[in-house]
Image: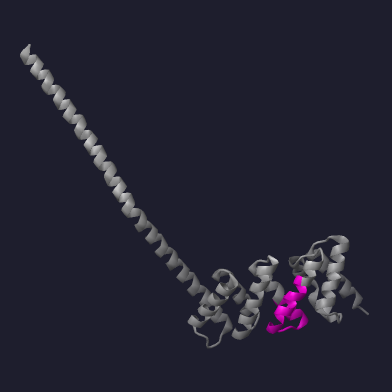
Amino acid sequence: VLEQDAAFKQTRNSATNYHGSIRDIIAGFAKFQLSAMLVMKPLQMIQNALSSINETLVETEDAVISISRVIDENISNGEIADEIYRIAQSLGQTFDVVQEIAQNFAKAGLDWQDTLKATEAAVLALNVAELDAAEASEGLIAIMQQFGYEAEDLTYIIDVLNKTADKSAVDTQELLAALQKTGSYAKESNLTLEQTVALITAISKATAASGQNIGNALKSLFAYSSKD
């Protein structure tokens, strides 16, 4: 009996020691995991930040190269990048938006200095009129080409559009859409930008039609009235 009792005690102690060692292993592994997380999380954050910076640098370089090819002037890539970042920072926009607008103006045939002037004006329009980059640049380019305006006139054009939108039911986006459709026909009919905007605004108030529909209607009217 004594031998059996001693054997039972030894077995119980062995089981206790066994479970204790398992608990120690689990606790140690949990500590290792926690330590690894504390170390790896900052490292992962740093790695993600470096990857993001690298991606931004690549995108910036691609955009700058595209602009320099279009402009075809002796402008360094560094100067192009600095100017675009300057406009973006001063007017509270992203580099991607500003470089897209700049590329659109450069593709329209503007030189570097006029591209910068036009880009600043377009970004301003984008901020105050809730336009996107394509609308702000393409709409203003159309007005410049159709009515014979220069880059330095864009601020005045934006004032005309915004004041009209503030005082009537038509918004700047609709005005731009209509002007893109009918601007050249209005110019051929000896109408000024202001007169064309007035016509668009009056028709919008009377019909509540979209800018594109108003532009198409005026284009047809101008084309018909110009016939012999």
**Which quadrant is home to the N terminus?**
top left
210 lies above or below 189: above
In the rendered image, residue 153, in percent from the top left (x then y), is placed at 72, 82
* Nearer to me, 196 or 72: 196
Res 47 → quadrant: bottom left
Res 93 → quadrant: bottom right
Q: Residue at x 29, y 49 (%)?
A: 35
Q: Is residue 64 left or right of residue 207?
A: left
> What is the residue that sits farthest to the top in this orientation?
1
Residue range (magenta): 141-162
In the rendered image, residue 12, in percent from the top left (x then y), is placed at 16, 22
43 lies above or below 69: above
* Nearer to me, 24 or 84: 24
* Nearer to me, 221 or 101: 101
Q: Residue at x 61, y 85 (%)?
A: 113
In the rendered image, residue 9, in percent from the top left (x then y), is placed at 12, 20
**Which quadrant is home to the C terminus?**
bottom right
Secondary structure, magenta segment, majority class? helix
In the rendered image, residue 18, in percent from the top left (x then y), is placed at 18, 30
* Nearer to me, 87 or 119: 87
